[in-house]
Structure formats: structure tokens, C-alpha cells
Image (cartoon, rainbow, N blue to C red):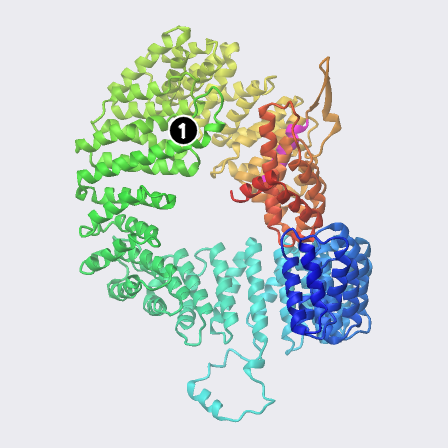
Amino acid sequence: MANMNITTILEKMTGKDKDYRYMATSDLLSELNKEGFKADQDIEPKLTTTVLQQLEDASGDVSGLAVGEDRVVEMTNILCDKLLNGKDQHRDTASIALKTIIVEVTTTSLAEKILVSLAPQLIKGATAGKSAEVKCECLDILGDILHRFGNLITKDHDSMLTALLSQLSSNQASVRKKSISCIASLAACLSDDLLAKATFEVVQLLKNRSAKSEIARTNIQMIGALSRSVGYRFGPHLAEAVPLLINYCTSASENDEELREYSLQALESFMLRCPRDISPYCEGILNLALEYISYDPNFTDSMEEDTDDEAQDEEDDDESANEYTDDEDASWKVRRASAKCLSAIIVSRPEMLSKMYLEACPKLIERFREREENVKVGAFSVLKELVVVLPDCLADHIGSLVPGIEKALNDKSSTSNLKIEALVFTKLVMASHSPAVFHPYIQALSGPILSAIGDRYYKVTAEALRVCGELVRVLRPNFEAHSLDYRPYIGPIYKAILARLANQDQDQEVKECAISCMSLVVSTFGDGLQRELPACLPILVDRMGNEITRLTAVKAFAVIAKSPLRIDLSCVLDHVISELTAFLRKANRALRQATLGTLNSLVVAYGGQIGSSSYETIIAELSTLIRFVVYSSILHFLATMTTGVDLIYCRSDMDLHMTALALELCCTIMVDRKSIQNVGLAVRYKVLPQALILIRSALLQGQALQALQRFFASLVQSANTSFDALLDSLISTAKPSQSGGLAKQALSSIAQCVAVLCLAAGDQKCASTIEMLKGILKDDSATNSAKQHMALLCLGEIGRRKDLSNHAQIENIVIESFQSPFEEIKSAASYALGNIAVGNLSKYLPFILNQIDNQQKKQYLLLHSLKEVIARQSVDHTGQSELQDSNIEKILALLFNHCESEEEGVRNVVAECLGKIALIEPRKLIPALKERTSSPAANTRATVAIAIKYSIVERPGKIDEIMYSEISTFLMLIKDSDRHVRRAAVLALSTAAHNKPNLIKGLLPELLPLLYDQTVVKQELIRTVDLGPFKHVVDDGLELRKAAFECVDTLLDSCLDQVNPSSFIVPFLLSGLGDHYDVKMPCHLILSKLADKCPSAVLAVLDSLVDPIEKTINHKPKGDAVKQEVDRNEDMIRSALRAIAALSRISGNDYSMRFKNLMNKIMASPPLADKYNSVRSE
């Protein structure tokens, strides 16, 4: 049916009436745009011929509609011929048609066919003696082709490059400009050799100082365009390019501002895109940028701004047509380019910040007197970058800054863009500097800021309100001492903000900023606004009723409630509490979280003014909220619960955070209102049951677990719930259900809550509980294993917090559990013994050491107990001091004796102990560990490397200075002959990169090649095990490769400036993408990070990355695969799709036809498309 319609339309398109032809052509366009349209073989030739005829139509309207209707080589050739040899009136139409065809081509085969005939014709058109218009059209289309399909015509790159480079010397500026764009598109897919050729030829042209000025400018633009196109790949050519550009910039004639501008733009690109190779030239570039930030040949420092009278006189004078005017002054472009270059230095060269501070600040501040607004904006922008990376750097320059800020905000000629930039800068400076430095200038600053609040443009108003918030903090930084009389400023600030707060007819951003700012004013100056509060506070309450401003208003009342001034809220408190309680039922997560925080602050500050009935309502809502979190989590994870184990999961960290806030509010209410019996009973009967369900969660940790512990402590202290009842409830929660026992994390959570409950109840209750737990351990009944497990965990948690030496023989009772046939009980006993020792080192640590010497069969468990002691004591200075006072020499001797143990578990425990002791006694431990790096025993060397890993922690310590000079010895074990030692060294390197990257940055040039070598599959580590009926292949290097890739992933986060991504992606990452499942997963993460942080490096080799990723997402497990294998494969596919999503965000990914085809395949497969859309929305 569709083809019958097409036939009818084609007949009408050949009619005599041009309006008839136009309508028919329009109808054809509509038919072609319909989904699923496909022309028959008979119709296709007729359709092509008719459309091509329409291109010759005398009516421009008709020929314009004919564009883009088919995509065949014949049409392309005819269109190209019309472009090169046709009439002028048809050239634009042919050009648009060709561009449309290039955009619409989706298959590689069709693209290659078109390129074979089209590219040579376009090159000929661009280089032959055609008109400038034809050359520009050809170059424009060729640029589009190279942008999309440059990698398909690699054999023609050399000839194309030669032809295009020749056009850089064209007499027509438009041709030169198009040639630059075209070469830049080609450069992205050039080989390194051809890129070197292009750069060499441009540099040679630049060395010819006799060339015309416009040609030199073109070549400098070409250098900058190449750098922006190829990024880090331009690094090897900086040695020739940078000195030339600096020389051109300094030696150019006074009127050649464009040449200086282009030179500075290229240098800026080098700073951002070649951070490693540009290092030798940074000093020179900085000096150049500092010199030209003040470049203004038409204005000297001795010249003053023209007065109004002089300006009027000049207006009256008749100026000659040839006289130089400000409109002709382009020197501001040089100053703007210098400012951007300085910004690039600030962002990419932190080591140069001190010089920037000393030399750049004064010159940038001078630019506030600038005539040209673009340069003023640039100066504010650069200073803003400097303040971000170097807070408090402008403290000595505030006096110079204020006039510039004042002028930018007050000058009637200032645009909104300049005002916004000035306000953003002012806010940042106020937030990052001491308030005292602004006090001498408050009067000068407050006027312009308050005036900006009344600006007509909403973005200026919103930014001014944010600055006003910082101004409030500056005026009264603390509530005890007053170094400034802030009272004269309260009234003007309040009135300016109130005018915006009361106005309903304004932008949402302004409304929110006005609410936030008013809350700061009330919380800071409330003692001086007692008369105004009855008018202001109801407006804030009213904003809580508006869905758009509700969240901001809730946060505003939290700010007011936290004020030490104890603002009188009696006129609105009941209404606020009622509104907030209702918000706990809302679906908006952010609103519920903010509401919980605000209610907590209000209860702390105004608890006595809140009625009992309001508390009961709040508690009921909290109970519902916690129940909703718990049960929605159960439903969400029901399908993925572990078989046979009763696990209750929280859906996410955000759910846990919500629960923590709800429990915190419960605790606050119980502490403040413990005398009200109804409150305690409401918590007991409504919240406690939900808390007992929550405690069984396998994901309960961090803030939520701490809140739950405080909840039980508060509940027992509120005198409304008996200790015994609470203890029974907690221990009963730990009992295994019919489907099995609780997860290990859940048991640990229960034990911690029991310990906190005992300590909160007092010594007597705590002692009786410990005796009860001892009694459980003495019961040898085989059916009592779950109780014994729980008892050991509880004793450990109590012992860590309290000295248990008054309970005779408790250590012997615990160690008896080492004989249990159950592994979980032995592990719990080891944990308990170590934590009991933490409570009294002097008594229990010698006992553990003596047992290690005498009990060979129990050594592994006893070492775990020792590890608990050392790990707990190494966290703070008090613990370190206590451990040093103990017999540390004996501990070290014991640990070093076990370094060569054949059991990997023992070695790992020893290594962790040594690492933690190194934090306490680095001068003793580091030399001892260093000495053992040359031990003939591989196990010892591996243990030493793992020990170093445990000694590198995030917090600073006395070990840092010693480690800085010695760490290379340990990390060079990556060259060891034993794979276990190499893996240990890789893990240590990864930890150092994560926790203290400065320790290793200087070593990376030597370490990275060694690390990359560990990612390679080594055949000598692959062995075949004969299992009789079949053979099993074992890859002993798998764990090492996985660790190496994970280390690279960490380095990309902390030491990206030291990594050359191009040398890693191919061949190492490419190999990993096709490796084992365990290796592919970290490789996908690495690829995602590189796509975000180094897109040009990934783009250069994108084609080669497609194959291994495509194989991964198309991999199908065997038909007899178990569920675990199926799930692992699903995880792997989703991981690969996340990497693909990251690749799809790279600008220019459509260069790669193979990647585009991969995306088309994913979207054509409903299962893959669903997964892809799912990971993109994560």
C-alpha cells in the first residue's frame, strides 16, 4: 500500500505546477519519514531518479525538499558533481544533501562505498582551482566525513593530510579556517607517525619568520586545534611547539593581538591536555601569562579614567573616520586568553600555587579596573579557581578586591554576567577566609550586595541572597565576643530579604534563597529582631505549605532551632510541629530526612514547649516510618534472599540513613521527656518491635547501628522498660528460625547492642549478665551451640568496653570454646578473648602470649585474638601507649617466628599484627621488616609486603616520615620471582595509592611498567590437573592479574597525572577485557573511569575495545550451568554495559562505526536494551 502511494506521489512530482510539485515532494518526505518504510526494488530506481531531477527544479522550495531522500552511491556522485561543477543556485542544496547523507549512513559497508568515490572528489575540489565558496563547501563536508568515518580510510590519510596542509597557505581566510577544522578532525584518527608529520610541517612553516602575519596566525591556530583534537598524544611535540609559540607571542608587532591570543590559547590547551609533558615549560608559560594579563598598549597605569565632563567633550568633538577608537582595540582578547591560561595552570599545576599567589593575585586584582567586561569576568574566574585550591590566599588583598567588587555590582554598564561572576566570587571568598579580614570593608560591601538583591534579573538576585547569607556569618561569626558592631546592618539586611521572602510572584530559585537567607538572619540576629519575628516567622511557616518551597522551609527551621540565641518560636511552634509530623508520611525521601533532622533540633531546643500528645503522634509516625523501611526492604529483596538463611536487608544506604535519623529522634525524645510516662510507653510498644526486626538486618552498620545502640541505651535509662525484658528481647532475636540462623553481621549487631545495654544499666546488671553468659558457655550441651556463639560475641563486646578481671577465670572459660566442633564458635571465642584483653591489657595480654607459646594446636585462633588486641589498640594514642607499655618485644619475636608459616591464614594474621604495630613503633619495625625483604623464604617476603599494606592507613602518623624514604624497598618486591610475593607487593601499592598517594607518586615511573606486566597472562602459571575422567586447567596467575588491575583502578583515582593511559589501554587493558570473569570486572571499572577522565585516549582506540566488550555482553552460560554461574554471567554483562554507557558519554564516540553498530545491536535486543537502560539510570 505504501509503495502505491509513492507511485502516485512520484507522478505528481513531475507536474507543471510548481505548487503541485512542492506539495507532492512534501508528501514524499512524509512517507519516507514513516517508521518501517521500505521501497520495493522496482520503485527504488524511479524514486532516486525523480528526486535527483527535483534538485534541478527551478523552484528553490521544491529542490530544497528533495534533500536527504535516499542514501545510495549514485546519488552521492551526482550530488558531488553538482557541488563541484553545477550552477551556483544548486550548490547549497547539493551541499545540504551530501551532509544529510553522511549523517544518515549507519552501516560500515555503505560508508566505505561512498568514501571510495566521494573523498577523492572532495579533496580535488578543496585543492584545485575552484572558487573559495566551493573549496569551503568541500572542506566542510570532508570535515563531517572525517569526523564520522576517518578511521575507515586510513590508507588515504597520508595523501589527504598532504593536500589539506597545503591549504593552510591559501590566500582566502575562510579556506584556511575550514582547513584547520578539517585537519583537526583528521588528526583524531591519525597514526602517531602521521601526527608527527602534520606537526612537523606546521612547525616548519612557523619557523619561517618571513611568512605573512595571517599565515603565521593560521599555523598557530592549527597547533592549538591539533592539541585540542588529539589531547595527550601531542605531548611529544611540545619541545618544538612551545618555544616557538612563546617567541611569537613576545615578538609579535604591537597591533597583532590575534597572534598573541592564538598563541596563549594553544598554550592553555597544552597545560590542560598534556600535563606531564608540559612540565619543563610551565615556568615560562606562567611568566608569559602573567606578563600579558596586563597587556594594554592603549592604556597605561598613569592614565586615569575619563571623567564625565571629558566624555561629554569628546562626544561633542567631530572624530575623523580614520581615528583609532575603543571599538578597534582587540588587546582585551590577549588579556582574556592570559586569564584562561592562568586558570589552566591553577587547575593542573598545584605545585605552582605559591608563585601564583605571590605574583598573579596583584595582577589579577588590577584587572578590576579593566575597561573590557570579558576580561573582568576572566579575572574573577581565575581568582575563583585560585581560592578553591588555595583557601585564605587573598586575606592580604581584601582591601584591593573590595573596590573592584563594588564597581562590578554598582556600575550601571555592568552586565548580568559580570554581576553574577562578581557575586559568586564574593561568596566564595567570604566562605573561605576569616570573617575578621572583611570587617573594615563591611560598609562598602553591604550596600552593593543589598542593592543586587533587588536586581530585576532573578539569577543576580539569587546569587546576591547567597552572598548575603555569607555576609551574615561575617558580621557575627560567634555569639560570645563582638569585634564589630553589627547592629546597624541588621535592619537593612532584614528588610531587603523580607521584600523577596514576602513576594510570591518570583522565580523558585529566588524564593528558596530568600527562605535560606532569612533563616540565617533570624538564627544570627534574632535577639535584635524580636519585634519583627511575629511578622517574619508566619511567612516561613506558610512556605512549608507550598510544595515547591516546602523542603527549603523545613531546613530553614532546623537552622533557626540550632541557634544558640534560643529564638522565641512560641507563635508558630505548634503549627510547625504539626506540619513536620505530617511530612513524615510523604513519599519524598529528601523531605522526610530533612523533617527528621528538623524535629530533632526542635525537640532539643524547645522540648518543654511541645505537648505530650504531639510527642505520641511523632513516635507513632516514626514507628510507621521504620516499619515501612524494614518491610519494603524485605519485599524488595525477597527474590534474592540466601536460601536457608533468614536475612532481612535494608534496600540501600539511604534507607539505613533514614532509619538512623528516626532512631536518633526517638533517643532525643526519650532523653528530654523521660519524665513523661506516655512517651516511654509509646516508644516501647510502637518503636521497639520495629527495632528488634531491624537489628536482624545483614546490612546494618555505621550510623544506623550506632543509632540503634543509643536507642536501646536510652530506652533502658528512661525507666519505662526493664533491663531484663530488653535483654531477653535482644537475645531472643538472635535465636535461629526454622529456615536457619542469622547472618554473621546481624549477630554482631545484636551483641553490640547487648553490650551497650548492659553498660547503660549499671555495674550490677552488667555483672549479672556476664555471669549468665559464662553459665551458657559452661553448658556442654550440643544443642546449645547457637546460644554459646551469641554468648561469646556478647562477652567480647562487653569486655572491649569494660574491664572483666573481676570475673574469675573468664579467660579460661572462653578459651575452652576453642575445642568446639563448630568453626563459628571457635572464631567467636578467638574474637571474644582478644576483645576481653583490650579491657585489661596488663592481665590478659600475657595470658594470650603464653598460650601462643604453649598451645601449638590453638595458635591460629590465638593469633587472631592477638590481632584483635593490636588492631583495637593501634587506633588511638591512648591504646598505642598502653600497648607500648606491654611486652612488645615478646610480641614481635613471636610474630616474626610465624612469618614462614605454611598456612596462608596464619601469615595474613601475622602480617596484619606487624603492620598495626608498625604504626606504634615505626622506628623499630620498619628496619626489621626491610631486613626481611631479602629473606630466602618467599613466605617471609610476602608477609613483609602484606604487613606494609596494613601499616599504610589514611590518618597521618609518625610512621609517614620513615615510610617515605623506605617504601620503595618494599614495593620493588613486585619484581620478585615468587607470584605470591608479587601479589603482596601489588596489594601494598594499591593500599598506598588509596590512602597516601604522595608516598608513591615519585616511584610510579619505575613501578608502572612492572605493575602493567602483572596484568599479562603468563603461560608458565597455567597448569593442567588430571582428574581422571577429565582435565582441569588451573590459572595460578589469575589472582595476581586481578590484583594488578584493581591497583590500576585505584591509581586512576589518586595518581592520574602520573599515568599515561595510551600505553596502558593497548595492550594491557585490551587483554584484560577478554580475560577471566574476575579480571573483566575491574577492567570494566577502569574503562569507565578512563572514558570519564581521559576521553581522548579512549577515543583513539575505541574500535579495538568493541570486540572484547561485545563478546562479553553476548556470552551465554552453558545449558547445565548452576544458578551461581548464571548470576555471575549476569553481573558480568551488567558490568560491561556500565562501561558501554560510560563510552557513550564520550564526545565524538560516533567517530567509531564499530561502537555505533554495537549500540544499535544493544538497542535492537530487548533483553540487552532493558539492562542497558537500567544501568544508565543507576
Q: Is residue 870 left or right of residue 677?
A: right
Q: Quadrant of residue 502?
A: bottom left
Which residue appears at 31% of the width and 13% of the height?
Answer: 772
Which residue is at 74% across, 55% downward?
A: 150
Q: Position of residue 889 (x, y in %)?
A: 49, 22
The residue depicted at 44 percent of the width and 61 percent of the height is 394
Q: Position of residue 717 (x, y in %)?
A: 23, 28
Vertical arrangement, residue 552 with respect to residue 289, above or below:
above
Q: Is residue 732 magenta?
A: no
Q: Look at the image and give the residue range highlighted in magenta.
A: 1037-1050
Residue 185 can be seen in this image? no
**Other residues around mark 1 within 10 Å, as few (<14) / some (14–19) / many (≥20):** some
Q: Nearer the viewer, residue 809 or 1054?
A: 1054
Whole-percent x, y for residue 789 in the image: 41, 15
Q: Which residue is mark 1?
A: 879
In this view, 728 is above or below 1069: above
- Please give the name of the residue rendered at 20% of the width and 27% of the height, measured from the top-left corner: 719
Asked where in the image residue 474 lies, by quadrant, the reply is bottom left
SS assignment for the magenta stretch, majority = helix
Give, as a three-letter code, the residue at label 1. Gly
Q: Which element is circle 1 on?
A: helix
| Depth order, front residue of 769/541 | 541
Q: Quadrant of residue 332?
A: bottom right
Residue 505 position, x and y percent, is: 33, 64
